[in-house]
Every structure is written in C-alpha cells, then in structure tokens.
Amino acid sequence: MNRPGAALDRTAEDLLRDLAPQVLGALIRRYGHFGLCEDATQEALLAAAVQWPAEGQPANPRAWLVTVASRRLLDQARNEQSRRRREDQVAVATPQAELLSPAADTGPGTGRDDSLALLFGCCHPALRPPSQIALTLRAVGGLTTAQIAAAFLVPEATMAQRISRAKRTIKDSGVPLALPTGPQFAERLAAVLHTLYLIFNEGYVSSGGQQLTAPALSGEAIRLGRWLHRLLPDDAEVAGLLALMLLTDARRTARTRPDGSLVPLEEQDRGWWDQALIAEGTALLTWALPRGEPGPYQLQAAIAAVHDEAADVDSTDWPQILALYDLLERLAPNPVTTLNRAVAVGRVQGPAAGLDALAALAPDRRLSAHHRLHATRGHLLERAGDPVAAAAEYRAAARHATSVPERRYLTAQAARLAAGAGQRGE
C-alpha cells in the first residue's frame, strides 16, 4: 500500500477515471448486465475515494476495484428484497471465491480488451449516434447524466431515458460485450472514431445555447482519444483523429473574446494558440501519414496543421489545403467537406469560383437550411464585391443558427454590410 494521505489527490483521481471503464468492462464481461455492473462500479469508485486517502492506495488498484464491485453485485443478488428480480441478471451461481478473486481480471491484456470492448459496446451498431454519444460519455467517460444533459441542452430526465434505452437495446440484442473480429472490427472502430469526433465537435462549437464552446466535451473527447491511442498505438487513423482534435482545440482560447463573442479565424490572435497541443498533434500526424493511404481523419488533421503553421490567414498555404480537400472529397465525400472546399477554392481561384463550387450544395437538403451554407455564401459574396447579397445571406444564416454567439456574429456581419451599402447608396 502507498502511504496514506489526507485526501484523494489529483493523480489518484485521474487513475480512478482511467480504471473505471476497465472495471466496468470486466464486470459486464463476467456478469452480463450493463446497468447493475455500472452501479457496482460506481460504488467501488466511491469506496476508493473514501478509503484510499485513509488507508493508502492498494498495490493493484484495478484488482481492488474489481473485487469491491464484485462484492457489491453479490450483496445485491443475495438481498432478500431484490433477489427474485435480480438473480436472473447476475451470475449468483458463480462460486463466491471466484467472485471475490480478481485473478481472472488482472492477466496480461485483459484490461486492454475489456476497456476496448466497453467502448465498442457503447458504439453498438443498433444504437443511433446520439445514444452512442450519451452512453460513451456515461460509461467510458464517467460523466454524470446531469453533466451530459447540460452539455447537450436537454433535460436530465430526457438524457436518462436515452441512456436507459441504449443499455436496454444492447441487452436485448443478445450480443456479448466482446471485441468484434475480422471486418467487423474495422466497421465498429469507425463508429467509435465517429462518436469521439462528434463529441469533440459539439464541445468545440456547441450546437446551441449561450456559449460558443463546451470545453468539458472537447476535453473529454481528447482524453478518450489519447486513451484509445494508447490501446491501439499502431492504428494510424486513431492517431489521425487524436491529431485532428489536438490541432483544432489548440485555437480554442483565441476563438472567443472576454464577453464570449465569436472571433473568426482570420481575426484571431495566433499568439493565443496552444503551441504544446500543436506540437503534439503535428508529431502524431508526422508518424501516421507515412503508414499507407491516409484516412479521412488524417487528411482533416493535415488541413488543420496547415492552418496552425501559418502566421496569418493570408500566408496560409491555401493551394495545399485545396489539394487536401480534393483528396478528402474523393475518399469520404460529404456536404461539409464540399462546403469547406468551396472556401479553399475561393482563396485559390477567387470568390466567383468558390461560389460556383458552393452551388453544388444547393439541392442538398442536409445543408439547405444550415447556417454554415448561408454564412459561407455570404463570405464569398462579400469578397466578390456584392455586399447587399452578402448581407442577405448573413441574415439568413443568423435565422438558422442555434448557437447564440454565432447568431450574434452573423447578425453583426449583416448589419455592418447593410450600413456600408447604405452609405454608398446601394
């Protein structure tokens, strides 16, 4: 045991957070019930937070947590008031010696497999992306239901129902919590990466509310990305996603003013960009890119790296960014890629060409009512010398924006252009 202390220090808190998905994964693998195993894991973590400062940290913290959580499950199963409805859910037939022995859960590789299996389970193909995100943040990230609900601006009861339904869907599927093999592994890994990507994006640009960002979400996505990279150190696309998040999050501090208002990329003070995150992301990308054909996350990370290395927006290597978007559009075409590529086209070939590239999105219902399409069109129209049309697009973008800082910024852009046009008598 380590020397007892007066309180659980930050290192121990971080350790518990890292061990939580390993313990939960081990319990679910052995006993099979997501909800009961999650409750037992939470009780074991609480017990550690209380006992470790007084008694010292055990030599094998993971085994300690698995043992305590297993005892909680056994106690629940033996409780007379709950036995009848729980005994079918927990393997009470397992000999008590096995229940209380952590040996089966501490061998080489089992922590890795259980942690990965839990993350893959949270991204079960039967779940829709919102449920995958919520369950990942709850079971793997350790966020409370209230924290997740607040981040996504929904009532706590709504989020609790979403998480409960997700657990029930996994249980009803009958698919054991285990790592898929063969082609299924790549398919499920793609879902895992997409889930982390969505979590990060929601934290970097909140889809609604008074704040532009939700750092708790983007920070959690990066933490889970680092964790996944440790578990799959040879996967270039896992490294690419982590690099993308780091290179993008490096700009977060410069994206808002003290009053919370939005600062666009071209106006940001790049001295505020986090150089440590940029260096870490660049190193990951440098390692990943030579390992075969790059995936979409590596290409997006490369685009972010080009932005991060430029002294200002005008000195950015826009031809290289356009070439990367061309590759990305061929590899993983989607409307957002086409939208971003149009901006690069506008920088390289002129705003008229950018507007032509943007015209391809006009029939796409997924973006026709999205504020980013109108905002991008407004930006290109302004650069093309049509402030009246640009103001109209900014007003349309403001009407569709759900984030208050973005709406205020777009409204201000429209007012600025309208005022300038009025002074010129246009």
Image (cartoon, rainbow, N blue to C red):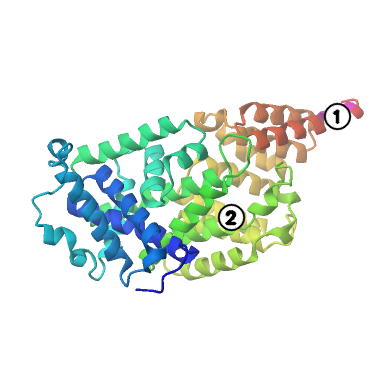
Q: Quadrant of the N terminus?
A: bottom left
Which mark lies nearer to you, 1 or 2? 2
| Location of residue 184 in the rendering, given as x and y in whole percent from the top left corner | 26, 52
Q: Is residue 163 visible?
A: yes
Q: Nearer the viewer, residue 139 or 205?
A: 139
Q: Quadrant of the C terminus?
A: top right
- Assess whether residue 248 is covered by the magenta stretch: no
What stretch of residues is rendered in magenta?
418-422
Q: Is residue 187 visible?
A: no
Q: Which residue is mark 2?
A: 248
**In the displayed structure, does residue 224 sit left or right of residue 278?**
left
| Location of residue 199 in the rendering, given as x and y in whole percent from the top left corner | 48, 46
Q: Residue at position x 51%, y 48% from top?
A: 217
Q: Which mark is residue 419?
A: 1
Q: Residue at position x 69%, y 61% from top?
A: 310
In the rendered image, the vertical position of residue 288 relative to residue 119, given as above or below: below
Q: Earlier in the sequence, mark 1 or mark 2?
A: 2
